[in-house]
Image (tube, rainbow, N blue to C red):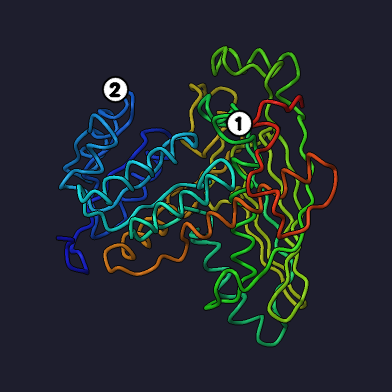
């Protein structure tokens, strides 16, 4: 028998043990009414380490499970966070679906990291499985939950829009020097390159900013997509070798590259037929202080902008101060000396705290989250339209039936850079 709502403490099982799982643990430090009760990774040492970290942080008691099925069917798990690599997410969702349908678990909900899947077909199957199992579902797109972005949207729509008119242009850019793990660099596993990895953030945070508060996300209709992808850095011989050394021989950008730069423009219509524009740029070829996210919202009489590198805290370290490479000041940190911006609360600023808090309360109370698998599907449709545009060199007009089964060249092993 499923627990009555609201649940006093939501017990969460985490599938995955990598970089993003550790980011979520940091976020959960500021979330009430939840505990991390189980983790699973196919690598025993990794799952044991993540469980130990959760317990050391006071987020448990947390156990390391020997399989995804064991975690899903544990009597200590009420909801599952899918934080594993992209090529395993549909497999995990099938395990969840099968367990629920067979009555071996009484889960309340499932949340999945961005992107929901590697292509539109997989994303639709993720949604179908969640809804066929009767599960509440949440799409973990952290940038929407950023403290700065949420505050900015609230001010614009409350103060500027009533007299100045609705916003019509949203720009979002995210750039850094490259992902942490080998699978991100491999198109068949990740589903693409930087467009898949990072533009999923950009198009969705832009779509959300343009959506009137209180309206459904589909009150805006995407009508066209135009994109360009390129390899600016990581196919150069020096960097091909550097990638092999840091990520292993299976990441060989002389043979199987994925794009390290992407630019996309999406045209949308509002309910009155007004035209809106999303401009998005992403790159794995940016070398600055660290991760740079830049978000803007523009309207007839106003503008909003936020940059993750415009921090209130900075430190200066002279050339006489040595130190090992690390990311203790900012994500994707590229230097250890000079004038350095410091993000003092990455989990909060980047949106993980608000995101996890929101999902926990929605699942506890049986309410629909602000971001669901439906949004994950919509994001994937936009990404596939952008990939198709880049492949053909033409604008893609939506809806487009061909996107339902489309797989980008990077993912199907035909992209040469």
Assess whether mark 2 and mark 1 are in contact (beta carbons under 8 angstroms).
Answer: no
- The mark that comes first in sequence, 1 or 2, is 2
Q: Quadrant of the N terminus?
A: bottom left
Q: Residues within 10 Å of mark 1 (few under 14, many from 20)?
A: some
The disc at residue 377 is: none
Residue name at image x 61 percent, y 31 percent: 178
Above or below, 369 relative to 249: below
Q: Residue furthest bottom?
A: 163
**Element assignment for label 2:** helix
Q: Quadrant of the C terminus?
A: top right
Above or below, 12 relative to 269: above
Q: Residues within 10 Å of mark 2 (few under 14, many from 20)?
A: few
Of the two numbered discs 1 and 2 in the rendering, the one whose residue sits closer to the viewer: 2
Q: To which residue does mark 1 refer?
A: 178
In the image, taking residue 154 as reference, residue 382 lies left or right, namely right
Q: Position of residue 327 (x, y in %)?
A: 49, 33
Marks 1 and 2, how far apart at CA: 25 Å
Which of the pair 142/88 is nearer the observer?
88
Q: Position of residue 7 (x, y in %)?
A: 20, 64
Residue name at image x 52 percent, y 29 percent: 180
Q: To which residue does mark 2 refer?
A: 45
């Amino acid at each position: 028998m499923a627990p009555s709502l609201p649940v006093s403490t939501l017990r969460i099982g985490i599938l995955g043990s990598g970089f993003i799982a550790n980011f979520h643990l940091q976020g959960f430090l500021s979330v009430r009414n939840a505990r991390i009760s189980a983790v699973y990774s196919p690598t025993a040492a990794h799952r044991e380490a993540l469980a130990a970290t959760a317990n050391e942080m006071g987020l448990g008691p947390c156990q390391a499970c020997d399989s995804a099925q064991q975690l899903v069917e544990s009597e200590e798990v009420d909801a599952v966070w899918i934080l594993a690599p992209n090529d395993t997410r549909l497999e995990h969702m099938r395990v969840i679906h099968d367990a629920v349908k067979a009555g071996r678990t009484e889960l309340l909900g499932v949340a999945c990291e961005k992107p929901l899947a590697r292509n539109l077909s997989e994303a639709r199957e993720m949604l179908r499985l969640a809804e066929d199992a009767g599960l509440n579902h949440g799409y973990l797109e952290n940038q929407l939950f950023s403290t700065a972005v949420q505050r900015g949207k609230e001010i614009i729509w409350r103060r500027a829009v009533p007299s100045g008119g609705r916003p019509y242009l949203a720009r979002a850019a995210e750039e850094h020097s490259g992902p942490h793990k080998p699978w991100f660099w491999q198109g068949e596993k990740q589903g693409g390159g930087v467009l898949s990895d990072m533009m999923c953030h950009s198009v969705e945070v832009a779509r959300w900013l343009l959506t009137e508060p209180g309206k459904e996300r589909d009150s805006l209709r995407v009508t066209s997509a135009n994109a360009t992808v390129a390899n600016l850095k990581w196919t150069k011989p020096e960097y091909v070798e550097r990638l092999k050394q840091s990520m292993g021989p299976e990441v060989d950008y002389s043979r199987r590259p994925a794009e390290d730069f992407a630019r996309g423009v999406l045209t949308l219509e509002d309910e009155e037929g007004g035209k809106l524009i999303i401009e998005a740029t992403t790159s794995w070829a940016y070398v600055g202080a660290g991760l740079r996210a830049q978000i803007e919202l523009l309207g007839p009489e106003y503008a909003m902008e936020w940059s993750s590198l415009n921090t209130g805290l900075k430190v200066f370290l002279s050339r006489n101060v040595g130190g090992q490479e690390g990311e203790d000041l900012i994500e994707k940190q590229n230097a250890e000396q000079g004038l350095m911006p410091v993000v003092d609360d990455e989990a909060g600023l980047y949106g993980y705290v608000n995101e996890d808090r929101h999902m926990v309360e929605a699942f506890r109370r049986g309410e629909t989250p602000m971001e669901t698998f439906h949004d994950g599907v919509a994001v994937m449709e936009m990404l596939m339209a952008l990939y198709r545009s880049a492949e053909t060199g033409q604008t893609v007009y939506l809806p487009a039936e061909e996107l339902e089964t489309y797989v980008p060249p990077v993912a199907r092993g035909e992209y040469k850079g």
